Image: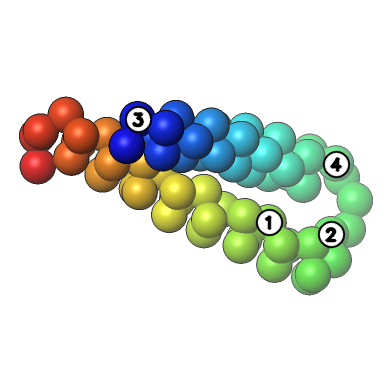
């Protein structure tokens, strides 16, 4: 179970970092952004939220708090 937690923490961290960097790039690039690019970043944000929730649940369950 500890290995799964570590993997989920790494995945969540990478997704959070990617979402923030991509979001800031879109915000401050000053260029027109294609709809397909926005859709990709929206999916990335949704996956990040899901991975974060799963990681938090795994950590809480493993620590015996739920």
The residue labelled by disc 2 is: 33
| Front position in the image: 43 or 64 | 64
Q: Residues within 10 Å of mark 3 (few under 14, many from 20)?
A: few
- Dot 1 or dot 2, earlier in sequence: 2
Q: Secondary structure at mark 3?
A: helix
Q: Is residue 33 visible?
A: yes
Q: Residues within 10 Å of mark 1 (few under 14, many from 20)?
A: some
Q: Is residue 56 visible?
A: no
Task: Say left or right for 18 vs 7.
Answer: right
Whether pointer 1 and pointer 2 mark residues with C-beta atoms closer than 8 Å, the reply is no
Whether pointer 4 and pointer 2 mark residues with C-beta atoms closer than 8 Å, the reply is yes
Most extreme residue toward the bottom, as rendered?
Answer: 35
The residue labelled by disc 1 is: 41
> CA gap, disc 4 to disc 3?
40 Å
- Dot 1 or dot 3, earlier in sequence: 3
Q: Is residue 41 above or below residue 39?
A: above
* Residue depicted at 79% across the width and 70% down the height: 36
The residue labelled by disc 4 is: 29
> CA gap, disc 2 to disc 3?
40 Å
Task: Say left or right for 4 vs 13.
Answer: left
């Amino acid at each position: 179970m500890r290995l799964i937690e570590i993997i989920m923490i790494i995945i969540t961290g990478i997704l959070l970092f990617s979402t923030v960097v991509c979001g800031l790039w879109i915000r401050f690039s000053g260029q027109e952004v294609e709809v397909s690019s926005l859709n990709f970043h929206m999916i990335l944000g949704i996956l990040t939220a899901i991975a974060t929730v799963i990681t938090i649940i795994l950590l809480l369950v493993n620590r015996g708090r739920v």
